[in-house]
Image: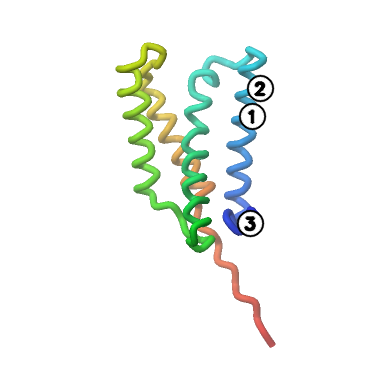
Amino acid sequence: MRVEAWLPAPRARTGLAVVLVALALLRVGEAAGGLPGWAAAWGDDAVCLPLVLTLALLAHRLIGREPAWRLPKAHGLAAVAIFAVVFELLLPAVDARATADPWDAVVYLGGWFFFQTIINAKTPAVPAARTV
């Protein structure tokens, strides 16, 4: 099955490509030791929700939802809340290696907004082919 069947909108495929390229650049930058401070602090947080939510969207479409189906906004906002609570409140309380950063929650929200407006955007209707 082709990727167009799961992400029919070209804008969605482009958005996912942007996220994957950003993730690759973050990994290369970390390996080279040359990431700016903001990218080291918030880069992973910015790309994690677009990746996780895209996987959830694709899983729904893979199990039988139509290609135009969109992940509800409430699911994305719930993911933002879950990530913020788990990674910024609970994990730092039980693991000394984890650091609570309230700005991470803002970055998670930005990642959800990117997903919602670019990857999960409404698919334009394609007119049915005419038969003569």
Marked residue nearer the N-terminal end (3 or 2): 3
- Which quarter of the rendering shows the C terminus? bottom right
* 79, above or below 12, in the image: above
- Which quarter of the rendering shows the N terminus? bottom right
Residue placed at 34% from the left, 35% from the top? Answer: 82
Query: Amino acid under label 1?
Result: Ala
Residue furthest to the front: 63
Query: Amino acid under label 3?
Result: Glu
Residue placed at 63% from the left, 45% from the top? Answer: 14
Residue 4's disc number: 3
Marked residue nearer the N-terminal end (3 or 1): 3
Residue 28's disc number: 2
- Asked whether disc 3 touches disc 1, contact meaning CB atoms under 8 Å apart, the reply is no
Q: Position of residue 106 (x, y in %)?
A: 39, 29
Q: Quadrant of residue 96?
A: top left
Q: Position of residue 52 (x, y in %)?
A: 48, 39
Residue placed at 38% from the left, 36% from the top? Answer: 80
Q: Position of residue 107 (x, y in %)?
A: 44, 29
Determine the CA span between mark 2 and mark 1: 6 Å
Residue placed at 41% from the left, 25% from the top? Answer: 104
- Asked whether disc 3 touches disc 2, contact meaning CB atoms under 8 Å apart, the reply is no
Residue bearing the label numbered 1: 24
- Asked whether disc 2 touches disc 1, contact meaning CB atoms under 8 Å apart, the reply is yes
Determine the CA span between mark 3 and mark 1: 22 Å
Query: Amino acid under label 2?
Result: Val
